[in-house]
């Protein structure tokens, strides 16, 4: 009997040794298809929002072309890959001012009836207008535009109170002017007082208020007659009680105090009653007096306010630009005739005291009630062009031509033209509301 395998069995041995080409092709194609589907699935998942940090959703990368209207501000077209604004993630301090001729302020010093003449630069004769068309662009996030209708909706049934000095009054006037124009005449009102001024948006049952307290703590210059001579001012650094009775029942408080402390002199401070007069004060170095005053304010906030009822903000110091050498102009006269921002990154002039800023930071860190900074110092440092300069008033009267010709004595390089830089402060504030 033959032991040879039948033809069928012989064929099976051949298959075990080597697969036909057609079967290999089919297998490779199947594997390729599976790999492709798996890759697409991963791609779909990676683009889903669940894999992105909620606070930093990235905007579609789009080409943006910078405006080339301003001198020395010509940029090449580049991709905008900044993230959407999130108050916890985006640092608005790092960025640059970009000229955009298409931007128009929401108001003018002729259209808004609530501006002081002190900051109404166009009305006071300022001929240039470029300072009104610079917008602040943070490096890593987009700052949302100020939306007056949305701002009023957020303030519905609320009181918003700005507390501080004349710079804080400027921020208050800016905010009012940025919303008032959408409200019918019979649905709004303004009541001006020496200490407290109130703008009311009636149909929103909302008020936007300003309270005059240049030191936050009490002083002998809080009354109707302001003491102009720093040598005669006395601060009651252990009390805010007289002022604070006007801060109760407020939903959103925005504080500020800086420039009035910077007289260059030791400050006369006292504890207790002003009745002690000249005999009861002690002279302290400015940072020490400021630290005591800020601690007094912080103690009141922590002991009085309910953070579930009241939100607290603090506007950081507004820079002064009285030394043109700070930005490399040896022959300049303060901020007079400046028409463009400083271009040098991280520019910091002598008008902003980092010791004082450190006092505020250290004080807030130790507080129980959360305080949100409206950090305007660095972004405002660049804006040597935006002060009221000689286009202002003194003693209730607009500067004469003779006074304008003497900027060394009459240029105001502390306050800001409106519309202007304080509008950007409020844009940042609005983004945090």
Image (cartoon, rainbow, N blue to C red):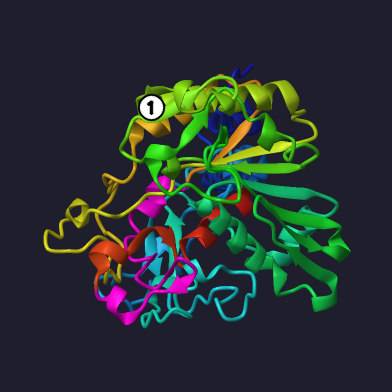
Q: Residue at x 51, y 28 (%)?
A: 277
Q: Quadrant of the N terminus?
A: top right
The spot of residue 325 in percent (x, y) is: 17, 54
Figure check: 8 above or below 157? above
Q: How many tags in the picture? A: 1
Figure check: 367 above or below 89? above
The spot of residue 220 in percent (x, y) is: 54, 38
The spot of residue 334 in percent (x, y) is: 25, 60
User: Which residue does the numbered mark 1 point to in the structure image?
Assistant: 287
Magenta segment: does it hold 350? no
Crowding at mark 1 (Cα within 10 Å: few <14, some 14-19, many 20+): some
Q: Residue at x 78, y 73 (%)?
A: 183
Please say whether residue 412 is visible from this viewpoint. yes
| Residue 291 appears left or right of 303 | left
Figure check: 310 above or below 178? above
Q: Disc 1 on helix, strand or loop?
A: helix
Choose top left, top right, bottom left or bottom right for residue 412. bottom left
Choose top left, top right, bottom left or bottom right for residue 56. top right
Q: Which residues are magenta?
A: 376-405
Residue situated in front as seen by the camera: 275 or 250: 275
| Residue 205 appears left or right of 420 | right
Residue situated in front as seen by the camera: 421 or 185: 185
Q: Residue at x 60, y 28 (%)?
A: 297
Please say whether residue 52 is visible from this viewpoint. no
Choose top left, top right, bottom left or bottom right for residue 137. bottom left
The spot of residue 433 in percent (x, y) is: 68, 48
């Amino acid at each position: 009997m033959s032991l040879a395998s039948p033809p069928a069995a012989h064929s099976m041995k051949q298959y075990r040794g080597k697969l036909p080409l057609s079967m290999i092709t089919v297998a490779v194609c199947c594997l390729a298809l599976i790999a492709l589907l798996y890759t697409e699935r991963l791609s779909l998942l990676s683009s889903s929002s669940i894999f992105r940090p909620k606070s930093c959703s990235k905007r579609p990368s789009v080409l943006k072309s910078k405006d080339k209207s301003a001198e020395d501000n010509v940029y090449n077209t580049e991709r905008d890959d900044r993230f959407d604004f999130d108050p916890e993630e985006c640092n608005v301090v790092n960025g640059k001012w970009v000229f955009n001729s298409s931007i128009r302020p929401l108001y003018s010093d002729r259209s808004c009836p609530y501006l002081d003449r002190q900051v109404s630069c166009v009305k006071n004769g300022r001929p240039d207008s470029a300072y009104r068309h610079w917008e602040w662009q943070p490096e890593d996030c987009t700052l949302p535009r100020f939306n007056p209708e949305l701002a009023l909706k957020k303030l519905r049934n609320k009181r918003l109170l700005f507390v501080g000095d004349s710079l804080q009054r400027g921020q208050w006037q800016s905010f009012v002017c940025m919303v008032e124009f959408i409200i019918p005449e019979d649905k709004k009102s303004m009541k001006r007082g020496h200490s407290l001024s109130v703008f009311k948006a009636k149909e929103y049952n909302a008020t936007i208020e300003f309270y005059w307290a240049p030191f936050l703590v009490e002083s002998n210059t809080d009354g109707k007659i302001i003491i102009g001579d720093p040598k005669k001012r006395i601060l009651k650094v252990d009390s805010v009680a007289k002022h604070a009775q006007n801060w109760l029942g407020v939903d959103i408080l925005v504080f500020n105090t800086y420039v009035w402390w910077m007289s260059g002199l030791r400050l006369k401070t006292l504890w207790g009653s002003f009745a002690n007069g000249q005999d009861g004060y002690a002279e302290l170095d400015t940072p020490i007096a400021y630290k005591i005053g800020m601690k007094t304010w912080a103690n009141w906030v922590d002991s009085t306010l309910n953070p579930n009822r009241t939100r607290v903000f603090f506007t950081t110091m507004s820079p002064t630009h009285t030394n043109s050498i700070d930005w490399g102009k040896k022959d300049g006269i303060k901020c007079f005739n400046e028409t463009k921002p400083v271009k040098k990154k991280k520019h910091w002039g002598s008008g902003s005291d980092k010791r004082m800023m450190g006092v505020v930071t250290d004080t807030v860190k130790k507080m129980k009630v959360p305080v949100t900074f409206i950090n305007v110092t660095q972004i405002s440092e660049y804006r040597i062009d935006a002060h009221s300069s000689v286009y202002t008033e003194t003693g209730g009267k607009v500067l004469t031509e003779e006074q304008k010709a003497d900027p060394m004595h009459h240029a105001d390089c502390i306050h800001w033209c409106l519309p202007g830089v304080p509008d950007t402060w409020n844009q940042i504030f609005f983004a945090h509301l």
